[in-house]
Image (tube, rainbow, N blue to C red):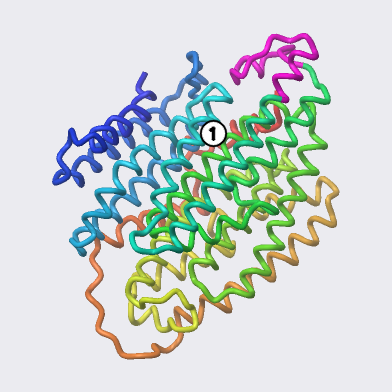
Amino acid sequence: MIALALVLLPATASFALALGIARTRAIEWLLTIAVGGTLLAAFETVAASAGPTVTGFLNVDATSRLFLAIINPVFLGVSVYVWSRLAASPELRSEVERFVPLALAFLASANAVLLSNHLLVCWLALEATGLTAAPLIVRPGLASSRQASFRYLLFSSVGLGLVLLGFVCFLRGMHSTGHAPTFFINELLAPGARASSDWERLGLALVLFGLGTKLGLAPMYSWLPEAYDEAPPSVAALLGAVQFNCALVVLMRVLQVYRSDHALLVTVELLIMGISSMAVSTLSIIATRNLRRVLAYAAINHAGVIAIGLGIGKAACYGLLLYVLSNAVIKAVLFLTAGKIEAHYRTKDTRRISGLIKDLPYSGAFLMVGTFGLLGFPPFGSFFGELLVLSALVDSGQILVFAAFCVLITMTFVATGRTIFPMIWGEPKASHTWPRQTFASAAPKLVFLVALVALGLYVPPVVNRLIRAVAASLEGS
């Protein structure tokens, strides 16, 4: 099956580089071939008109197809960015030679999460993304990046440990109700495959909390700002746009199976984590003047909105998924742009950066449009997604959550605009002569911005069908 190429192709290229089989001089071409072939396989899988295909541990359904259409193009854009950086700065070759095999293994693990039909295999593949991402966070010679990598790995391990403990509770619940134990998703979705029990409720609560840690939700969010701040821009983009969505898919798989029997538990826990995350991120954005950390706290805010949408379910699901698609593109654009700005100004302090639209026109434009998408301006998909989530909150009677949501979004809007907009339109603080920005370095972000605008103006029919199918599946069996 062509879907297997999504895992095998990047994994094989990664092993070839790690074992020295492939020459490091050809590393750019091997990266291009592996990622390009994987992207073609992803497009073929997404465009397939057939219904869900389940073959043993492999599950190609609407959920996997939708998220394959997100993470593989984002990875290609990040790869082009890395290649352009290497062309402009040959001294980065040693770092790129370390980045490529780990990044390809990361991509193989991410695709394995999306295609798995077994909850434990999902867990193992998600753990593999963390193990390959942790060394990518480390920057040579920077002790703070090593600390951020360790903190990321620690929180990731604790979160996934709670998820595994939740799976043990699921298993105990199956035994206690006399059902055959299984973690195959298609079997769990079959009528009569399981029955509700206290063990199952406990397991679901642990899984939601553990995956919330992986998503950067409060209260276990403190690893995220540090990791996104210290990681290279390409790695921050992979963490925010790829790994985040892999953890989200695992959460969605669990909800597809268990939500129908435990709707109240799901709603209460996700709403609490979601609104708490929005509150924490809003206050942190007001207090920080570090550009990367502003974007990191905005990512926590987005995670909170997604948790609220998942908690409400029903009418919120379509808007939630539209928000997720837009959010992935926004993160990729903003973190890559922040890296470019930091490289030129040699600082992350937003107070020392001004006149971007004059000094770095491409980066200034990308930061401006990305910020509009970040704040949920029309006509971006994030605007319509938030609107549908808010409408669902009112329809479900969650008026207090709706009010808190509106207040926090408004505060975030003001705080983010106060920090970022002077960087774009303010007068330059000093006279500089910058190297001319090449089209190759700007091309990935330009494509991402086109996709971001397109999601707000016109959702292609194939994507619309996938979103509707995934939204329906989130109501559970």
Residue 173 colored magenta? yes
Estimate the x, y position of residue 284 in percent, counting from the top left.
64, 69
Part of the protein shown in magenta = 169-194
Identify the residue under disc 1: 465
Q: Relative to the observer, which residue lies in front, 130 or 355?
A: 130
384 on left or right of 339: right
State the residue at coordinates (20%, 64%): 88
State the residue at coordinates (51%, 36%): 126
82 on left or right of 461: left
Q: Relative to the observer, which residue lies in front, 367 or 164?
A: 164
311 on left or right of 102: right
Estimate the x, y position of residue 72 in percent, counting from the top left.
39, 41
20 on left or right of 423: left
Q: Quadrant of residue 247?
A: top right
In the image, what residue type sits under mark 1?
A: Arg
Q: Relative to the observer, which residue lies in front, 207 or 193?
A: 207
Residue 322 colored magenta? no
Q: Quadrant of residue 267?
A: top right
State the residue at coordinates (37%, 23%): 4
State the residue at coordinates (53%, 51%): 152
Element type where label 1 sits in the image = helix
- Residue 422's place in the image compared with 375, above or below, is below
Number of labels in the image equals 1
Residue 149 visible within the image? yes
- Residue 231's place in the image compared with 108, above or below, is below
